[in-house]
Amino acid sequence: MNVMTRPDELEACAPAGTFVETVTRVTHFTDRLFHFHTTRPSGFRFRSGEFVMIGLMIEGKPVFRAYSIASPSWAEDLEFFSIKVPDGPLTSHLQKIQPGDAILMRKKPTGTLVNDALVAGKRLYMFSTGTGIAPFASVIRDPDTYEKFDELILTHSCREIAELKYGQDLVASIRTDEMLNELFDTSKLKLYNSVTRENYPFKGRITGLIESGKLFDDLGVTPLDPATDRAMICGSADMLKDTKALLEAAGLTEGANSRPAEFVIERAFAG
Amino acid sequence: MTFVVTENCIRCKYTDCVEVCPVDCFYEGENMLVINPDECIDCGVCEPECPAEAILPDTDPEAQKWLDLNAKYAALWPVITEKIDALPDAEDWNGVEGKLEQLSEKAA
């Protein structure tokens, strides 16, 4: 299949309303997961936690999918986190990109996993599975999040231990980053990992760990309380549905940009 | 898979959905918006934004009968890409039942 990745060629045929951005770095974590950086268009503004449509020109046609921007709103470049689906229309090609290649990006970022869609609270939970960690990679590097909440708890659950590496490396890098430590109190951030298909000290789906109370015991915090706790959820369709039900049972209500409330969900990456 | 606009948009037309749509797939009639099912990427960001709770995923049994109407008018009405003021008496019409007969087929 013909995939156009040369920046000059892509510029010449990019559809209206799209940017052509250059890939600057690619990291493969497992045979199912990778991460890459691109240049950021001047004038492209977004809120930490939002997603944007990115794509490739394949056989002369643009193919786009929604991707969370994993970098914070102040960063000079853009970061994305992707699965590799062997016959996926986009990811089967996207997984082959190399530094110097170009990709397409639509100009309108959007999303619900943003600080603006939550009312003030004390503790922010970010529940993620798999690549659902991507928007939170952005949110946990945004000074606004630390200003709004006393405690940030990122949960990341995956099938295999190797899939946790991205989140673990990121959190470790935030804690030791001099610039970020000057901007906000990085000790507010906690990472909680669980694994579903391999032996690991914290085993099982996040929904089971919420339901049993093990999550709160392990973290040493009180159970979910609508007076203090806020949440963002990003993961598989089942995980979204089940986590939403648990939060609603605890008395939290779903919010949106137009009416902030106690928790928000991203559906864009489900399925 | 797509989301669809249903009856409670009629005579309200809040347009909060338009502001968040990443692919600009809303189309504007005189007193209702519709989604182009061929363009919607099923991201779902619009659904919780609608003050009239008029947007549903097509997996919802209630949504099925609105799918054809959305497709039909998306082909006839102009695209809308930015939020505008809601209709002046939107608050009065939000939640009123049986609004389908009030639907204007005119484009915005």
Image (spheres, coloured by chain):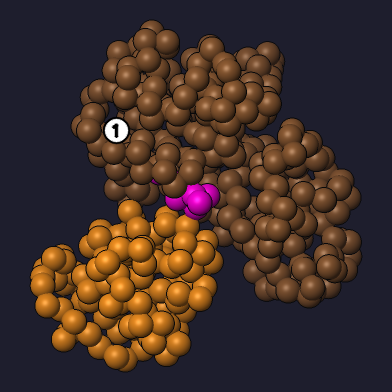
Chain colours: A brown, B orange
Q: Amino acid at mark 1?
A: Leu
Q: What residue would you read off at disc 1?
A: A246
Please state the chain letter of the residue tagged with numbered disc 1 in the rendered image: A
- Please tell me which residue is depicted at 35% across the width and 24% down the height of the picture: A210
Question: Is residue B98 in view?
Answer: yes
Question: In which quadrant of the rendered view does residue A25 lie?
Answer: top right
Task: Kindly identify the residue that appears in the image at 39 percent across and 87 percent down.
Answer: B72
Which residue is at 42% across, 39% downward?
A239
Provide the residue span drawn in magenta: A265-271
Q: Is residue A102 above or below residue B78?
A: above
A266 in magenta: yes
Kindly report the secondary structure that dominates the magenta region of the rendered protein. loop
Residue A134 screen position, x and y as percent: 59, 38
Residue A24 in the figure: left or right of residue B47:
right
Number of marks drawn: 1
Q: Is residue A78 magenta?
A: no
Few, some or many residues within 10 Å of mark 1 (<14, 14–19, 20+): some
Residue A185 in view here: no
Where is residue A125 drawn, in percent x and y? 41, 27
Task: Judge by depth and name the residue closer to the eye, A177 or A172.
Answer: A172
Name the foreground residue: B58 vs A259. B58
- The kind of secondary structure element at disc 1 is helix
Please state if B20 lies on the left or on the right of B49 as rendered.
right
